[in-house]
Image (spheres, rainbow, N blue to C red):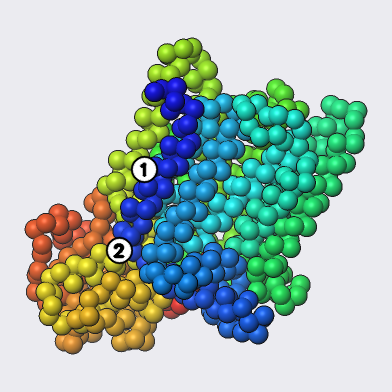
Amino acid sequence: MIALAQRHWMTVMIAALLALVVTTHGDYGISWDEHVQSEYGERALRYYFSGGEDKSCLQLSNLKFYGPVFEMAAALVYSETGLDKFRVRHFLSALMGVLAVAGVAVFGGMVGSRVMAFSATLCLATTPLFYGHWYINSKDVPFAAFFVWSMVYTARLLSSGGPASGGAASRGATWKNAVAAGLAMGMAAAIRPTGVVLLFGMLGTVVAYKVIVTLLRSEEKRPLVRMLAMVLIQVSLTAGVMILLWPLAHGGLSGIVAGIREGMRFSTSYPTLFDGHVVLSDRLPSIYILQYFVITTPLFAMYLMVAGLAIGALEIMKKPESNRSLMIFLLFPWFFAPIIFFVIFGANIYDKLRHFLFIIPAASLFVGLVAERLVDLFKGRRATAATVVIAAMLSFPMIEMVRLHPYQYTYFNYLVGGVEGASGRYETEYWTTSYKEAIEYINEVSAGKKVRVLLAANDFNRMCATRYARPYVEVDTTEEKYGRPVLPWKISSGDMPEQYDYYVASYRFGMSDAFPKAPVEHVVGRGGAMFTVIKGRARQALATRPQVATRPQVATRPQVATRPQVATRPPGLVPAE
């Protein structure tokens, strides 16, 4: 049985993940940007089906600066099948997450032993932040998936030919590897065109490494020339796929440059809660990305990853000409280049690590590198026991993933006291997916009686609630009612308008602080953190919901109430980057 599991572990793991996706994708609420993202996909389909005549996709907010590849695929599926739009989107997005995990398994097998591949794959699959985005992030998860596979085929392309160690597929500068690398890289660039700068920069770095090592160690130059020719094919195909699948690029070079420039700088800034302070997203400290990585990565995995950096560097120095060293070298720019780019250029980002999800697979591969080295210290049954212990430690975050379900992306490790300790200091449930649970609560307590709900904040996240509302639950947004999505803390008399029965608001941007005299009916949260508050005119609590609790610490969050820039920069008026 053990031998069978060792041989087919990847099949078993991927099958388990697919089963999990099938059974749980309906649990996840709609994220703040999803409605407008789906509309972008529908308009982009009309653009292509009309031969470029219908250009409405270029007039939808700032979405023209992003590629609609995933959005179009999802729109095509639900328009042809008649299935629920958002369940289809969540299911397909989660499949992209599984695809990324499979890519890490393949990459790990190319670099090292079965132990490395297994440990890296398990680490990535049990990283709550990465897993939690699978269902609700239709830009960054598909981008991460294609990014991983572009690295797989780039590594194969740049490796020396011949059979790879560990029974992996053959490598070398072949047409097959060049085309596969170009297609995967092109798909990633077509989702986030800004990524082409990073992808080409990484490719150039690894090619330079390969050229230098070859010139120093080998007298044969013809394989090097062939490799460079195949890389040129890869680059050309990447650019072609990106341009083909990005409507803005069809307007010429000016559109391409404008789109990439906007993606790199992003002209709209948002107030961002970071380490207990509210900072505009274009003025975040240089430590922002690294600090979020440290506090949102499970501790055991993070410790192994740090050790993996040292082990990887030593292996490269020891035998730089080997295929294994080349692939380990690739992991360094994969992980560090985006962080360095942010530190140097100060890119406008927010929402924790969601723009940088694609670096987490690289970190997982460093973890696998250490796991392999640790198991190699033992022989026979002791090696098997060591593998089991490492697997158990890497699986430990699954406890928190179950506890936080379906809000795994809010995970924080024990360095900040978990999600409870991070609440009020860092962004937690910033995408209002918990509005689904809030509206389902109102559906239940209303018992068929017609009620009106005032929802924070605007039309972009209206669908987060109305999609789940029963016919007798009517929803208005604060932007409709007051002309602004985020309301001052002491608005009006301090109580809710008479025509509304409930006020539903996220804790983000201090939206939950409006109507301070209205009693709290219910709170949606996990792990001691509060995500969404429901205020009403009379208390109606359900004994079966233990998370229903007053939140005395809300009043002690002065940084939320004293954020004047929130009112002048209403969130969500432009879809998040």
Q: Amino acid at mark 1?
A: Asn
Q: Amino acid at mark 2?
A: Ser
Q: Residues within 10 Å of mark 1 (few under 14, many from 20)?
A: some
- Image x and y of residue 82, in percent: 41, 72
- Image x and y of residue 296, in percent: 41, 46
Q: Quadrant of residue 198?
A: bottom right
Q: Is residue 435 above or below residue 118?
A: below
Q: Nearer the viewer, residue 100 or 275?
A: 100
Q: Nearer the viewer, residue 563 or 154?
A: 154
Q: Nearer the viewer, residue 485 or 129?
A: 129
Q: Quadrant of the N terminus?
A: top left
Label 2: which secondary element? loop
Q: Mark 2 or mark 1, which is nearer the start of the sequence?
A: 1
Q: Residue 374 has which mark?
A: none
Give the Cα distance between marks 1 and 2.
21 Å
Q: Quadrant of residue 44?
A: bottom right
Q: Which residue is mark 2?
A: 434
The reply to whether residue 540 is visible in this rendering is yes
176 left or right of 558?
Answer: right
Q: Is residue 274 above or below residue 532?
A: above
Q: Is residue 395 above or below residue 422?
A: above
Label 1: which secondary element? loop
- Image x and y of residue 298, in percent: 40, 39
Q: Which residue is mark 1?
A: 413
Residue at screen point 37% across, 78% down: 458
Nearest to the eye among marks 1 and 2: give it. Answer: 2
Marks 2 and 1: in contact by CB < 8 Å?
no
203 left or right of 359?
Answer: right
Residue at screen point 39% across, 79% down: 459
Residue at screen point 45% across, 22% down: 3
